[in-house]
Each structure stands twice: as structure tokens, then as C-alpha cells.
Image (cartoon, helix red, strand yellow):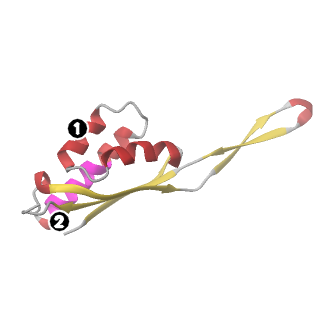
């Protein structure tokens, strides 16, 4: 049984978020949570909270044991970009993009024989 959770418009670039997401893809849930506790990136606490939310969804909605779950899929996709302006010389402006990320996680049960 697949369990989903997602968070939208996290104020970090997708490229930086993918570094954290790649570290936990395919890992058992408890191991992934332990890894995220010690990562220094800004996205790590957000992904940790997302995994806790997905585990709570699995436990409450489907009566699944969180210790038997693993991270089946996790993605960090582009969200909307916010345009910001920075002043330059001679009355000109430089455009800056503030990137955001949508993060989605899918948990599934570990196979008994695997």
C-alpha cells in the first residue's frame, strides 16, 4: 500500500533540495529519518518533517507499522519562481530569481521475503 505526502513551495532551489532527497531515496523509513537528522542542508528538516507526516498518514489512515516502510519514491520538482530586483549602476536593475520547490514522497511496505 503506497502512502503519499507532499509539501509545496519550499523556499530553496530544486537543485539544492535534490541533494537531500537523493540521500534518502530507497532507504527504510527509520534509517532515512536518522540520516536527515545529521545533514547540514536547509532542506533536511523540511524533508524530515515530510517523512514524519507520511508515516503518520500510513499509521492513521491505513494501519501500517512505520518500521516496515521504506521510501519508494521521493522527488524535488520546480515550483514557482519569485522575481526580485536588485539595483545596479546608472538607474538600472538586475533581476534575481527566488526559486521554490515542491517535494513529494511515496512510502511503501517492505517485502517480507526481500
83 to 92, vertically: above or below: below
Q: Which residue is mark 2?
A: 61
Q: Give the quadrant of the C terminus.
A: bottom left
Q: In the rendered view, does 93 fall on the left or right side of 12?
A: right
Magenta-tinted stretch: 50-60
User: Is label 1 in a helix, a strand or a loop?
Assistant: helix
Q: Nearer the viewer, mark 2 or mark 1?
A: 1
Residue at the limit of the structure toward the left, as seen here: 113
- What residue is pinned by disc 1? 34
Q: As drawn, is 91 to the left or to the right of 55?
A: right
Q: Is residue 20 visible?
A: yes
Disc 2 to disc 1: CB gap under 8 Å? no
Q: Splitting the image into 4 quarters, where does residue 91 fall?
A: top right
Q: Going 12% across and 63% down the picture, which residue do you hit? A: 111
Q: Can you give x and y, in whole percent of width and height, for residue 89 in the image?
A: 88, 30
Badge 2 local density, few (<14 within 10 Å), some, or many (20+)?
few
Structural distance between the alpha carbons of marks 2 and 1: 24 Å
Crowdedness of circle 1 by 10 Å Cα count: few (<14), some, many (20+)?
few
The answer to if 13 sits in the magenta stretch is: no
Q: Main secondary structure of the magenta part?
A: helix
Which numbered dot is residue 51?
none
Mark closer to the chain start, 2 or 1: 1
Amino acid at each position: 500500500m503506497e502512502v503519499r505526502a507532499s509539501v509545496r513551495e519550499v523556499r530553496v532551489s530544486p537543485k539544492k533540495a535534490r541533494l537531500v532527497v537523493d540521500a534518502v531515496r530507497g532507504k527504510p523509513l527509520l534509517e532515512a529519518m536518522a540520516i536527515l537528522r545529521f545533514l547540514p542542508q536547509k532542506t533536511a528538516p523540511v524533508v524530515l518533517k515530510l517523512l514524519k507526516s507520511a508515516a503518520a498518514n500510513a499509521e492513521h489512515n491505513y494501519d501500517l507499522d512505520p518500521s516496515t516502510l521504506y521510501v519508494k519514491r521521493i522527488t524535488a520538482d520546480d515550483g514557482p519562481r519569485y522575481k526580485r530586483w536588485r539595483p545596479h549602476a546608472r538607474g538600472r536593475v538586475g533581476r534575481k530569481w527566488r526559486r521554490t520547490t515542491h517535494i513529494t514522497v511515496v512510502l511503501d511496505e517492505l517485502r517480507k521475503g526481500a
